[in-house]
Structures are given as C-alpha cells and as structure tokens.
Amino acid sequence: MSGNGGGPLLEVDGVSVRFGALVAVNRVSLEIQPGKILAIIGPNGAGKTTLLNAVSGFYHPYEGRIIFQGQDRTHLKPDQVARLGIARTFQNVALFKGMSVLDNIMTGRLLKMRGSFVLDALYWGPAKRQELEHRAFVERIIDFLEIQAIRKTAASRLPYGLQKRVELARALAAEPTLLLLDEPMAGMNVEEKEDMCRFILDVNSEFGTTIALIEHDMGVVMDISDRVAVLDYGRKIADGPPEQVRKDQAVLDAYLGVGHE
Amino acid sequence: MVGVFYAVLVAPFKDMAGSPAFLVEVLIGGLFAGLMYSLVALGFVLIFKASGVFNFAQGVMVLFAALTLVGLMERGVPVVIALVLTMGVMVVLAFAIERIVLRPLVNQEHIILFMATIGLTFFLEGFGEMVWGANVKKLDVGIPDRSFIVRGVQINELELTAALTAAILVTVLAVFFQRTRIGRALRAVADDHEAALSLGIPLKTIWVIVWSVAGIVAIVAGIMWGAKSGVQFSLSLIALKSLPVLILGGFTSVPGAIVGGLIIGVGEKLAEVYWGPLVGGAIENWFAYVMALAFLLFRPQGLFGERIIERV
C-alpha cells in the first residue's frame, strides 16, 4: 500500500527534537518497510516516546524530515497525521473514560464516516445504514481482540491490561496503514503480555498493518519484530534484525548500564 | 417564637393553597425566568465540555447578540435578515475567539483561559457599547407581549413563545450532539484532547463549532430577555445567575443546565413572593446563591453528577 513502489512506508531522516536546551532525540534516522513490524527499544529516557510523538505530529522536529509514503510530512499536526492513515496508542492509555468500550472504538471510526455533519441527523436512512456498516466493522475488531464481554462497560472501569487492548481496538478501527504503539505491554503481567504479542502479530498478518512499537523491555519484542532499532540518550545506537541487535556490544552496554562519559 | 415558626413554615403554604391560580402564575413566572438562566447556563456547559474553558463571557455574549440584533433592526433591517446577520456575527466571533484567544493559549492552565474570558467580557462589553451605543433599547421581534387567561391563570404569549423556542432549541441540540458524527467528535474532545487528535478530530474546528453554537444559544437568550425587559447592559449580569444553575445542574450536563435553571427560577420566585415579605422583600436577587450553597453541602457534583456525561 505504499505510494512509492517498494520504498519504505515511513522514513525518519536525521530527526532531532529539542525541549529548550535538552536534545531528546538527536539526529535519528530509521525506516519502516511496508507490512513489517519494527520495534524501537531503549532504556528509560532514551527518546522513544518523543520520536513517536514527532512521527504522529504531537511534537515537531527541530531538524530532519519525516517522510510517509514518499511525501514529506514533517510539519503536519496530529489530526492531519491521523488522516494520512497513521493511528497510535499512548503510553499512559488515553481512552475516552466517560464512554463505553463500544463508543470508544466507534469514535476511532470517525474518519471513515462520510457525509455532512449536520445532515446526519436529518438523513435518517443513509445515516443509519452507515452507522450499521461501521458498527459491523467495529464488532469484527471486538471479536478479533476478544473483548466481546466488555463492549458495554465504561472504559474507566476496566483493568489496565484491558484498557490497553481497547485502545488498540480504537486505533484499529481507523484501519490504519501504519500503527504506532507506545509501550503496548507496559504494566502487564506475563499472560497479558503474551496475549498482546499474539494480537500484534495477528493484526500484522490479518490486516497487513505496518507496525512500529516502542518497548522498554527488550526481551518481549525480540520474538515479534522483523527489525529492532535501539535508542539511548536520544541517539540511535543499533538497528537491524533482532538476532543481530541482541548481540550488539553497544546495546548490551546501554542495557547493562556501562557508563557514558 | 411560635409566631415566627408559623410565619415561616405554615403561613406561606396556606397562602399557596388559598389561591392556587396565583400560585400557578408565580410558578409560570419562575419557569420563564429559569428558562433564561438555563439558556445562559447551556452556553457555559457546551463550551466547558468541549474545551474545559469556563467561559465567563457567556453573559456578555447574550448582551452582545441582543445589541447586534437591535442595532441592525434600528437601522431598518427586517427582523429575519437581522437575525441571520446576527448569527453570522456570532459565528465570526467564534472564529475570532478561537484564533485570537484560544489558539495562542492552547495547553495553558485552565485558570489562564478563564482569565482570558474575563478579558473577553470587558472587551465585548466595551466593543458593543462603542458600536451600538449604551442606551436601553426596546427589542420587538414581533412576538406580542399580550396575555390571555386560562382557568383563571394569566398566561403571557411572549413567555409561552419563549418556552416553546427554548424547548425546540434544546431538542435540536440534543439530536445534534447525540446523533451526528460531530456530536461524537465533540464528546471525544470533551473527554481527552490528545486521544481525539490522534483519531483525526480537528480540535480547532470543534472549538469554533462549539463557540458558534454557544453564540446562537446566546442570541435566543438575548432575544427573550431583551423582549421582556429591554436590551441593556444589566443583561450581562444574568450570567452570574447562571452560576448557581451550574452548581445545581453540574458543569458538564446539558439536562442539568435545563433542570437546574428551572429549579433556580421557580425557587427564587416562590421565595420572593411567599417568604420575601417576612424580611422586607427583595430576596430574589440573592436567594439563588443560597440555594446553590445549600446544594453544595449535599451534592457537590450537581444534580446529574458525572454519570450522565456519556449520554449527553
């Protein structure tokens, strides 16, 4: 589905993000090939979430370019990025707490809904048919992520692990080309982590969605990623297939806490 | 001691029972006043829900809308065209507020946005005065201020029209927010800005829409108050009356704003007519705040609390 015939779906080219004097991301370049799963790992404070926020338009790079489907998208705003087909989840879970699970996921579908805002209420027939079509798609996602039982539950009442799953469902409802997951397994127990890994792999194979995910814990992601990029102190220190990154000396140093001068 | 007890707890109710037609008239008067408070409170709630901004300028927006309408009509513009133009002015105002006031202050503390709306209040008041003059103006949109009598109860046509208009307005808004995509987008923005953005909902558009809707609600409130008591600067003070309404109804509930307004309106009228004479009258002006205070003690989250939020 990439618009540039075989090139990367997303290209981050020498991107730096600064907060005042602090350089959170320092000239990082990386690529995601269509249909693949990329993991971005690194210790706390490595700049992973900042990089993801830059890609999704919440932060703007101070230098460098972000290219999506062959076009420069460096300065888009978050809602414009979403319109391009990039969906994301948040590290601390950003569900609509007052809404039910179903309404949350339906909201993820907003971009796919057509027609005039105002006339929706009047054109009852088409509007209703459209609502039903979207509802059917949402039910498919609900089945897929095995959350049938909590459909009507208010999002705020769910345990953390399930909230993360609902957030994934909401992101999927937009049928994204690229899915960005910010620590999808943080705060989960082993069983929940295994479930989440399975869902990520299934999303990738079933919907063909390209996925970039951030993880703190390097063990979990090695098994599910096609490629792993490692950040440390805002710089990329390694990038390659999991088995290669696993043996990389710089990565081992970063994770084992060898001092930086 | 017994005399006081009798005068406060027994005599007023005897009066009510003694003249039911008069009681009904008082209640109708209260409901009408309450409706006006509801309309102003509704503007507050819409903006608060969508942007977390407590819009202190809502009362002045009512005044500004009424002033614009009267000003245009005084210059010979027919009612309907003046109304459409006023709506246009309120929409332009919404765009301007988003661009000049809200956008530069995005992600600031709520208190800063609140203070910005206080500034907006003074600006709009001065601007309105500058453009349209400071005299009290008569607003006549063609609704007759006549009364007719049903079973001994005097009913005012203007008040009846106002009640119907408000009912229609509220119904339209309810349908708009519950049945349309924009309603869902609005609820999403009200709940979590970042998440809404990440789903492609443009925050700025939503803000402009909400402020426009609040502006149009302000026109309706302005027409009704203006037709009843003339367009004058004290009109903006009814905004302060909507504060107790918000405390009663909750800051985020549209039905709460309506019901809260009616309770305040009826409560203060009853208090004024039946209990007022005990303390020399004129308690109507502060009784609403006493009610709000009493309410805060027992149900600080408001009548409709947080639970109803997802249904609005």
Image (tube, helix red, strand yellow):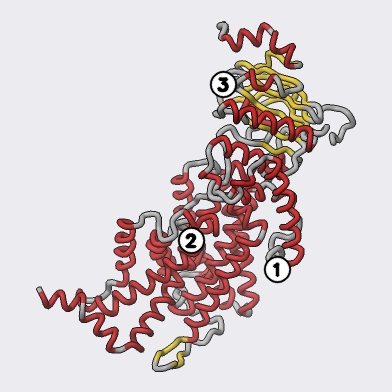
Find the distance from the CA under tag 1 to the CA under tag 2: 29 Å
Q: Which mark lies nearer to you, 2 or 3? A: 3
Quadrant hosting residue B174: bottom right
| Element at label 2 | helix
Is residue A132 shown above or below B234?
A: above
> Looking at the image, which residue is at 71% across and 53% down?
A135
Which amino acid, by three-letter code, is at mark 2? Gln
- Residue tagged 2: B58
- Residue tagged 3: A45
Is residue A211 shown above or below B224?
A: above
Is residue A203 shown above or below B232?
A: above
Quadrant hosting residue B275: bottom left
Disc 1 residue crowd, few under 14, some 14–19, many 20+, Cα 10 Å: some
The answer to whether marks 1 and 2 sit on the same chain is no
Q: Which mark is residue A122?
A: 1
Quadrant hosting residue B82: bottom right
Give whichever of A122, A20 is nearer the camera: A122
Disc 3 residue crowd, few under 14, some 14–19, many 20+, Cα 10 Å: some
**Which image quarter holds the N terminus of chain A?**
top right
Give whichever of B22, B220 is nearer the camera: B22
Find the distance from the CA under tag 1 to the CA under tag 3: 51 Å
Left or right placement of residue A146 versus residue A188 in this view: right
Give whichever of B123, A254 is nearer the camera: A254
Residue B311 in picture, x, y percent from top left: 55, 58
The extreme left residue here reads: B1
Left or right placement of residue B4 versus residue B149 in this view: left
